[in-house]
Image: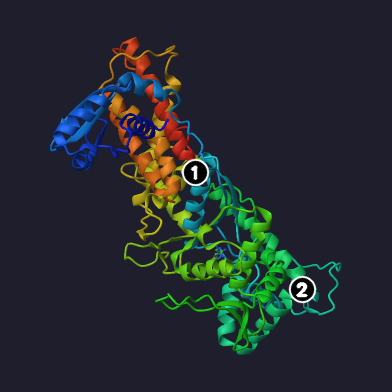
Amino acid sequence: MNLYKHVSEAINDKLGFAAKLEVPRNRDFGDFSTNAAMVMAKSAGKNPRELATEIASKLAELPFVSDTSIAGPGFINIKIKDEFIWNAAENAAQVEPSSKPQTIDLDYGAYNVAKSLHIGHLRTSIVGDTFNRIAKLLGHRTYSWNHMGDWGKPMALIIAWIERMHPELPYFRDDFDPKTPVDFEIDPAELNTYYPAASKYAKENPEFQSHAQEIKARFQDGHTGYFALYEKFLAISLDMMRDTVNRLNILPFDYDLGERNAAKYLPAVEEILRKQNLIQESDGAQIIVVRKDSDNAPMPPYMWTDSRGADTYDSTDLAAVYCRKLTDNPDKIIYFTDMRQSLHFEQLFRAADISGIFDYANFEHIGYGTINGADGRPFKTRDGNAAGLDDIIDAVNAAVAARVRDAEKSLDQATVDMIALAALKFNDLLHDVRSDYVFDPTAVTSFEGRTGPYILYTAVRLNSVLKRAPDAGTAQMSILSPDERNLLIGILDFERTVHSAFENRATDMVANYAYDLCQLINTFYHNCPILRDDVSPQDRAQRLYIARAARDTLARAIDLMGLRIPEEM
Ligand code: ARG
């Protein structure tokens, strides 16, 4: 239950105006406070303390309020009845769906065919997935789109590279018959080396470069041989992407459809654009002007085709919007990419808006910051190369394994993997998506502090107590100790957190909530023994009830972050 909302609405009803509720850090004087008396005093023609006394006595009449008091120049403190908190915790982890469910297309992941995933794909995957889970929990209809880079120059470079190694293959003939059986297999381990090798080679060999450009144009025109070869490496690449999705424990995408799929819609979109005279010629390229008179910053035109007539990242992105409109008819489309693509998205949103394809106001771009190393520069592997996603996961796994060894624990590989994943994802989610952060594989695996392992450890410990506990029957509340009370109130803040995380597009709220909840759980655990022999049956039943509510809530938060709780740690 959303305690804050419940209390806030009841107070507003009672007073007949909206009083802003605060949650004080220190709960000694109240669970909530409001400065309503100070805000209203002037218009009411009263002094603030006097008005506070009046308001406080009204609030004291509310059925869930146990006590009110006045502090300072007119702050009102409100304390909630233990009884009420206790009963509310019964369905602690339940979240009421949004009153305005929306259909939302989420564009994240967006991996590239035959290019290894790099560190930049980490945040889009983790943040996009958690946002998706939050939206679903709140009853929104979401569709996740893996808008793959599967249509551009890299495809042509890879085809050209394979041609260079195996010119005898029939794929490169213009009369290639797609039914021809070809005895040729691509080694998956090698595939990811083709693009970097080919693009390096192209830089040094203009001939190869222009040949690749030709291939791109013919490929996009449907050259049968190039296509057959492309289908081969696409399949391998898709398998690799799915591996990553599994490894990161993110939900499977609703659509693995990217630029190539979008390209099918280019003619329809072009017709819409031409009808409105929105396409102009400029130095051989076809462009859409998206500048407005009010712009202060440079706003280059949106490229419909490049000077060679090829489809572009821009054109396929606009076509993808059109496709989504036909497929899901979403209320909103939200993109999760590196902040450095902000200009591209601003242009896209304008192009879609002026052509009437999709309203500017219903687009959002969540641009994230960079993951840096200790030196404050983009994180690199030890040998100085740009880190691949697998390098990162491996580094974190090794750091967890080392810790487990040092602590002389023996944990199986599956458990080590779960801890490493939690370390990596939690650390990512913890930071405001818009800011850069420093990634230190050792620090994120600590079992203490704001880390994934600390969160899992708390959950494992609760699970183990609950598993060992005798059936205590239905618990009745007697007196709540401050630690029990604080924990219950923390639990009752979960629902509000999820709603705010959604509204503010701030997945870090869930991560920080999970940490705060774990702090409350561990204080409770420390001060309120449950299974010890000298604990009375009443206290034990009461504490088990609280522990269960805490566990259910924490497990929900952990699930939203796409982490898995191991059996032991
Ligand atoms: N594939 C691109 C990359 O790896 C990201 C695509 C993001 N989505 C989009 N609709 N443009 O950088």
User: Label 1 to label 2, Cα distance in Å?
Assistant: 41 Å
Q: Is mark 1 within 8 Å of ligand 1?
A: no
Q: Amino acid at mark 2?
A: Gly
Residue drawn at the location 38% of the way across and 46% of the way down? 509
Q: Nearer the viewer, residue 411 or 263?
A: 263
Tell whether 103 sits left or right of 552.
right
Residue drawn at the location 30% of the way across and 24% of the way down? 484
Task: Indicate which disc, 1 or 2, sits on the residue closer to the N terminus.
Answer: 1
Q: Please tell me whether mark 2 sits on a helix, a strand or a loop.
A: loop
Q: Position of residue 542 (x, y in %)?
A: 35, 17
As drawn, the label of residue 222 is: 2
Callout 1 environment at 10 Å: few (<14), some (14 to 19), or many (20+)? many
Q: Position of residue 438 (x, y in %)?
A: 35, 59
Q: Position of residue 53 (x, y in %)?
A: 18, 29
Callout 2 environment at 10 Å: few (<14), some (14 to 19), or many (20+)? few
Q: Nearer the viewer, residue 238 or 83?
A: 83
Q: Is mark 2 within 8 Å of ligand 1?
A: no
Q: Amino acid at mark 1?
A: Ile
Q: Is residue 129 above or below residue 527?
A: below
Report whether residue 327 is seen. yes
For the N terminus, the image quarter is top left
Q: How many marks?
A: 2
